[in-house]
Each structure stands twice: as structure tokens, then as C-alpha cells.
Image (cartoon, rainbow, N blue to C red):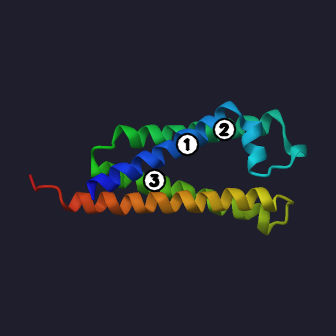
Amino acid sequence: MEQRRHRLLQVMVVERFVVGALLGLAPRTTLRLFGAPTNLDSPMVRYVARLFGIRNAMLGVLLWQQREDPTQVRRLATLNAATEAVDALSAAVPVLRRQGLDRTAAAAGLTSIGVMAGFLRLRALAAADERELPIT
């Protein structure tokens, strides 16, 4: 289990860093990849995208720092999964309100659901590794 946890942890950390870097360094391009309408592009939107990127990168840093401790990995995987769940719910709002962002919101929401699934799997692997730890 431990080897599978380490491999998945690496994948999830890379996801956090890649998304963080893309949003931090190229917010306009990243927003377009998610289908954001060009008429909504503004310095404020790019600023918020960069903040989102910083958040993702920092979540990845925290996870990487604790990669050897299954208890901490489980806790951080839970935090990351919850963050993605909130992101997915937030993406549903513009769709439900018919704000003309269906494509962008759907892309963001589906991405969040996929990433959340990865973190839930990481959580399960870390919990299994926790149960295998020797009692001290």
C-alpha cells in the first residue's frame, strides 16, 4: 500500500504544482483553456486566478512536506478533497443561475470532481497505511 500511496501522492502534488504554476504564470491562457469568455478577461479576474494558483501550489507544498507520515497525508488529502468539493459546488452556481458560463463552470466543476476523487483515493491509501503502523 505504501508504494501506491507514494505514487499517487506524487501525482497529486504534481497536479497541484502544475495548476498553480499555470494560473500563477499564465492566468489568461489557463482561463481560456477552461473556456472562459474573452470578454470577461480583466486584471481583476487574472489576479483572482493567480490567488487560486497560489492556493493550489501551497496545498501541494503542505502535502509534499508531510509525504512520509500517513496520518498527515490522510488529513491533508481530506483537506484537499474538501477544497475540491467546495470548488465543484462553486462551479455549479453560475450554471444554476444561468450566468452564461456553462462551459467554463462545467470544465472547472468536472476537473474539481476528478481531482477530488484522486485525493479521496489518496486518503484511503493513507488510512490503510496508518492501520499498518506499529503501535508505540
Q: Across the whole image, how many numbered discs are drawn on residues? A: 3
Q: Residue beneath label 2, please? A: 23
Q: Residue beneath label 3, please? A: 79
Q: Which amino acid type is shown beneath numbered disc 1?
A: Asn
Q: Is residue 74 left or right of residue 109?
A: left
Q: Is residue 116 left or right of residue 50?
A: left
Residue 120 quadrant: bottom left
Q: Residue at x 42, y 54 (%)?
A: 77
Q: Residue at x 74, y 51 (%)?
A: 34
Sequence-first disc among 2 and 1? 2
Sequence-first disc among 3 and 2? 2
Question: How far is the residue under mark 1 from the one under mark 3?
Answer: 12 Å
Do the numbered discs 3 and 2 sit on residues whose CB atoms are within 8 Å? no
Helix, strand or loop at disc 2?
Answer: helix
Q: Is residue 127 left or right of residue 100?
A: left
Helix, strand or loop at disc 1?
Answer: helix
Residue 91 quadrant: bottom right
Q: Residue beneath label 1, please? A: 56
Q: Which amino acid type is shown beneath numbered disc 3?
A: Leu
